[in-house]
Amino acid sequence: MIYALLDFDLLQKYNISIEEFINKSKELNAPILQYRDKNSNIQDIKNRLIKIRTLWSKTLIINDYIELIEFADGLHIGQEDLEKYKSIKNIRKQIGNKILGLSTHNKKEVLEANNMDINYIGLGAYRPTTTKDVSSIGGDSLLEIAKLSNKDVAIIGGVKLNDKLPTKYKVIGSDICKLISIQ
């Protein structure tokens, strides 16, 4: 299944509207949409989340901004956020029973995530990507690591629409933007 990553910086790069991205995600039957915005101010992010919610009725995940959890069905965090909030328990207190996802990059992090109160892991990067800095590329070795997870797995980082991945989700952002751009 496709887990659509609506990266606001990527939309701007390709001159794509939020509406266009959401419409394409619906056409692709994505059950989840994650909103990631690393550079806007919190009020703009909040306003966009409210807009997205009017256009997207399926699961909506916010990346990083725990203070905006009321506008989403869940939160996705990175390893650095674990350090920031001190523990998954602290994050869970703030978001309650909403969906919680965690980025992982290797066997050690996946095994640690097995003991955390999270709903899924993002595992990657699968291949190089221009949407964020990636220190390690796992390629097909990630598929073996994914088998160690007792959580649902979303392969992240450089994933393409035509990739055949034996995981629950494949996270697609730039390939959706490219599809829109060539139409």
Image (spheres, grey):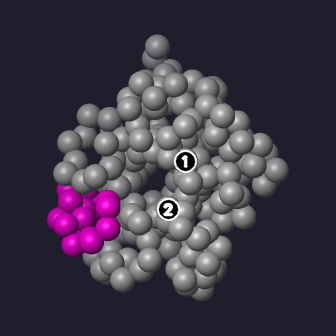
Residue 152 appears at what percent x and percent y? 32, 61
Q: Is residue 137 magenta?
A: yes
Residue at x 65% of width, y 73% of height: 94
Find residue 99 and name its label.
Answer: 2
Name which residue type carries label 2.
Ile
Residue 45 appears at what percent x and percent y? 73, 48
Find residue 60 and name its label.
Answer: 1
Q: Which badge, 1 or 2, comes first in the chain's sequence?
A: 1
Residue 106 appears at what percent x and percent y? 32, 72
At numbered mark 1, what does the secondary structure look like: helix, strand or loop?
strand
Residue at x 66% of width, y 34% of height: 54
Left or right of 126: which side holds 61? Answer: right
The magenta region covers: 136-153
Name which residue type carries label 1.
Leu
Left or right of 168: which side holds 178? Answer: right
Q: Is residue 149 magenta?
A: yes
Split into 4 quadrants, where in the image is the N terminus?
top left
